[in-house]
Image (cartoon, rainbow, N blue to C red):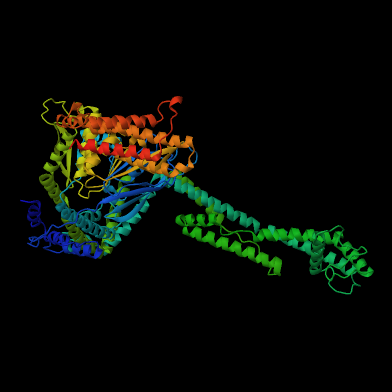
């Protein structure tokens, strides 16, 4: 049975609605529309919706493969470590991109940006320039493509872009995670899953959406849940707690019955509680004492009001009124005698005096005032008309001022002020304060007649005050003497009674009766609440029935069975492939007797752990047995396995992948990277020249296109990007290209260079020619015959030594000797009179070297 046949057979065992979803998904339909999800939820609530049918017999499993993600460049770099700003690091669209840089060149700074944005087992912070105060936060832009669609993402990004998570990253720390505790001591998920399982993933996603819709409806239903505030411990509360979908209307009617007799019993229970609560010694004593104090305060306030409105006090006010009137009369007579000859009447009246005082205040408060009031000097003016004062006006002002300063007038004013103060005291009497109101309310609870008498007495006193004010200010009727009243005596008696009662309050025999009365009251009150909400209780039963259907429908969306099947299919159809591939990966890098042990699956992904084959000792775990280098190889094998089974064939990134590896395995890693680059973009960051050489050789053998870049420092600033490799990192082909470019440039510049400048340029070119002769011998002869990774001679390649002729030897000796003589290696003797060769001679030596290298390389075929 194929995986497709297995899925079809399993689909026929699923509920009908899931079968229809599988068929729709296999046809490319989606469930992004909320209305479609709502219709599926409605279908689950219908009777018979779980009945299977044969709708999935013709299920097709043509599913789209995940899209390939490739990285294009890192640009707009700012504030990342100490990297130079605004540099752009470009990646080849396919094949192998090699970014070479010495330690401290900034190479890892670019790698960390990628690591932070793609999938890596180990995470690390991208820091700003920690040696610079106030350095800005790190930022950059990662340009990438998905199936040739150009995209970009800013760094930092939160949350991570899901598409970029298909790109995998490996460095020494990630290798530790693969081969350390994470990989050797715990299960590790391999993300490869047969593409046919994408259909099951789609079904899981739809089930999740339907579940969310049903959960939303459940939440709405719960918001409508009946919530009655019923006293706990009562029969009514017990009934509500046991309310269920099976509760019928008759049961609800019985529980909600509340008769007129129950109403009377509730009233009696409340009264009984009120009576018994007064027997609470502590509370009752405190209440009686507080009431006595408040009533005592009320009695004091009434006594103060009676005193203020007594006949003697009001008679005194009347005397003050008479005194003020007589003194005012005397002042008026004096004014009339003094001002009979004045042209206007009313001088000395209250209105006139008010006018005088206002004029005086105006004159004395004005800006620049420098004279007494009134001003009768030469330039004096009237304060109202502003006209100059004549002599008769000045004399009149002098008389007016004398009058206003006369004792008769001042005595009248003083008497009026005393009388006015007495009237104000009457007006300020307050008959309804908060304290009075509180005391009257408490008084009412103890003696309604006394409370009414006190309220009436306060009203009588308030009317007496109002009549007194009317009498004094508006010539109202004369006041009768204040009648005798017994309110104060009654208040005194009540205070004494309350105080005595507080002291004598009984503390025994009330708790049992009080608890019983409260229980009775609570039971009746709870029954009354039920009777008032009978319709709502019946509606709650209906709601719970609907909620039960929603819960059942939600259970039908459970994905455990689907994920279990996906895990099972993954195990059956993928486990052996993954295990075999992992074993081959370890064998390629000379790590033998290692395999993956199956640890089951979760959500369709395999869980496996590396193990040794044939171990019989209890302590023979991979972590305990393998050396550090072997554990690193194990980590790389795990990474290569995951990359191989990534069906999207998205980019993989390596930052110094051979760190801590011995030379025996470095060229094997180089070969694997070259093979990996045949099907996807591979990006490598390295500082290791020897490993770079291995990479170039492996890429050449695999005919993989290479994009080369160097990351270097300029002064103390790292992170500058230039295309190509430095001389020491170039292979023979790259060196030949460099030499050719150098010869072309020196030939072009020959006429503008003096002898020293030209000789320096030639020395450099000659040195490069000489070093390339040496590298050709090493690469094309020595390394082909002697395998450095195994420290052994390759017998099959010894035959090429026999193909090297005397002419080859002579040509090598002449070419190497000539270019070495031209190079700046030793001081040139004076008698030789060395003259740098011309560009055509350099060109000839270049062509000789190129042809010799090609011929020797051909001997290995």
Instruction: List the single residue furthest toward the right.
Output: 391
In the rendered view, tell whether residue 176 sits above or below residue 33: above
Q: Nearer the viewer, residue 848 or 439?
A: 848
Q: To which quarter of the image does residue 326 belong? A: bottom right
Q: Is residue 454 visible?
A: yes
Q: Which of the image's four quarters has the C terminus?
A: top left
Judged left or right of residue 76, residue 60 is left
Q: Nearer the viewer, residue 117 or 718?
A: 718
Residue 839 location in percent, x, y? 39, 40
Judged left or right of residue 158, residue 205 is left
Instruction: List the single residue furthest toward the left.
Output: 1
Residue 229 location in percent, x, y? 31, 56
Residue 116 location in percent, x, y? 34, 43
Count of numbered circles in the view: 0
Q: Nearer the viewer, residue 474 or 852?
A: 852
> Residue at (37%, 38%) from the top-left corner?
841
Residue 60 location in percent, x, y? 11, 59
Q: Nearer the viewer, residue 477 or 372?
A: 372
In the rendered view, tell whether residue 377 sits above or below residue 759: below
Q: Is residue 509 visible?
A: no
């Amino acid at each position: 049975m194929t995986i497709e046949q297995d899925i079809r057979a399993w689909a026929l065992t699923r509920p009908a609605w899931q079968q229809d979803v599988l068929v729709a998904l296999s046809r490319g339909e989606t469930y992004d529309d909320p209305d479609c999800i709502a219709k599926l939820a409605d279908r689950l609530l219908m009777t018979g919706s779980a009945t299977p049918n044969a709708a999935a017999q013709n299920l097709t499993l043509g599913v789209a493969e995940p899209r390939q993600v490739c990285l294009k460049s890192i640009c707009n770099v700012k504030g990342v470590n100490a990297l130079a700003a605004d540099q752009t690091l470009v990646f080849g669209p396919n094949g192998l991109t090699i970014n070479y840089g010495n330690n401290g060149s900034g190479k890892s700074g670019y790698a960390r940006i990628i690591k932070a944005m793609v999938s890596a087992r180990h995470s690390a912070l991208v820091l700003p320039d920690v040696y610079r105060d106030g350095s800005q936060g790190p930022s950059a832009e990662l340009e990438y493509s998905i199936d040739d669609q150009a995209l970009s993402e800013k760094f930092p990004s939160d949350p991570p872009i899901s598409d970029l998570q298909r790109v995998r990253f490996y460095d020494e720390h990630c290798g530790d995670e693969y081969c350390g505790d994470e990989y050797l001591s715990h299960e590790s998920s391999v993300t490869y899953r047969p593409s046919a399982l994408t259909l099951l993933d789609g079904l899981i996603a739809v089930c999740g959406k339907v579940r969310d819709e049903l959960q939303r409806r459940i939440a709405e239903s719960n918001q409508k849940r009946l919530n009655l505030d019923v006293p706990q411990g009562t029969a009514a509360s017990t009934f509500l707690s046991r309310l269920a979908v099976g509760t019928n209307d008759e049961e609800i009617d019985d529980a909600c019955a509340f008769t007129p007799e129950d109403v009377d019993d509730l009233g009696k229970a409340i009264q009984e509680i009120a009576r018994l609560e007064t027997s609470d010694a502590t509370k009752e004593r405190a209440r009686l004492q507080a009431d006595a104090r408040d009533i005592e305060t009320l009695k004091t306030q009434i006594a103060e009001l009676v005193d203020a409105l007594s006949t003697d006090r009001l008679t005194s006010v009347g005397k003050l009124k008479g005194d003020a009137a007589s003194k005012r009369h005397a002042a008026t007579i004096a004014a009339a005698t003094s001002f009979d000859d004045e042209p206007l009447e009313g001088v000395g009246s209250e209105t006139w005096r008010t006018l005088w005082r206002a004029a005086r205040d105006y004159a004395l408060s004005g800006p620049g005032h420098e004279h007494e009031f009134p001003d009768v000097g030469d330039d004096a003016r009237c304060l109202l008309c502003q006209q100059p004062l004549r002599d008769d006006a000045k004399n009149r002002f002098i008389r007016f001022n004398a009058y206003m300063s006369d004792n008769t007038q001042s005595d009248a004013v003083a008497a009026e002020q005393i009388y006015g103060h007495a009237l104000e005291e009457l007006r300020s009497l307050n008959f309804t304060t908060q304290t009075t109101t509180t005391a009257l309310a408490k008084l009412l609870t103890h003696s309604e007649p006394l409370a009414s008498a006190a309220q009436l007495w306060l009203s009588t006193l308030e009317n007496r005050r109002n009549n007194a004010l009317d009498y004094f200010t508006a010539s109202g009727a004369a006041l009768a003497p204040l009648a005798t009243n017994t309110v104060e005596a009654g208040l005194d008696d009540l205070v004494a009674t309350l105080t005595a009662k507080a002291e004598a309050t009984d503390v025994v025999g009330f708790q049992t009766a009080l608890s019983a009365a409260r229980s009775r009251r609570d039971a009746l009150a709870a029954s009354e609440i039920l009777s008032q909400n009978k319709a709502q209780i019946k509606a709650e039963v209906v709601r719970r029935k609907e909620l039960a259907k929603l819960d059942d429908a939600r259970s039908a969306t459970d994905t455990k069975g689907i994920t279990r099947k996906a895990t099972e299919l993954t195990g059956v159809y993928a486990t052996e492939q993954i295990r075999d591939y992992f074993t081959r990966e370890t064998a390629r890098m000379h790590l033998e007797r290692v395999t993956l042990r199956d640890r089951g699956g979760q959500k369709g992904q395999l869980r496996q752990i590396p193990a040794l084959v044939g171990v019989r000792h209890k302590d023979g775990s991979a972590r305990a047995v393998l050396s550090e280098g072997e554990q690193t190889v194990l980590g790389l094998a795990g990474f290569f396995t995951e990359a191989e089974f990534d069906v999207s064939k998205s980019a993989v990134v390596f930052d110094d992948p051979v760190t801590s590896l011995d030379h025996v395995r470095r060229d094997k890693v180089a070969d694997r990277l070259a093979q990996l680059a045949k099907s996807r973009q591979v990006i490598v960051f390295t500082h290791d020249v020897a490993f770079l050489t291995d990479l170039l050789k492996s890429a050449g053998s695999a005919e993989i296109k290479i994009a080369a870049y160097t990351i270097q420092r300029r002064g103390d600033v790292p992170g500058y990007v230039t295309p190509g490799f430095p001389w020491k990192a170039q292979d023979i082909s790259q060196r030949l290209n460099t030499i050719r470019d150098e010869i072309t440039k020196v030939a072009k510049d020959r006429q503008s260079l003096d002898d020293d400048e030209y000789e320096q340029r030639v020395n450099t070119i000659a040195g490069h020619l000489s070093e390339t002769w040496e590298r050709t011998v090493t690469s094309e002869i020595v390394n082909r015959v002697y395998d450095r990774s195994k420290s052994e001679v390759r017998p099959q390649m010894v035959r090429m030594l026999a193909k090297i002729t005397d002419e080859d030897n002579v040509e090598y000796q002449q070419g190497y000797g000539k270019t070495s003589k031209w190079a700046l290696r030793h001081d040139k003797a004076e008698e030789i009179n060395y003259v740098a060769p011309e560009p055509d001679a350099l060109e000839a030596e270049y062509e000789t070297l190129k042809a010799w290298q090609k011929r020797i390389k051909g001997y290995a075929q």
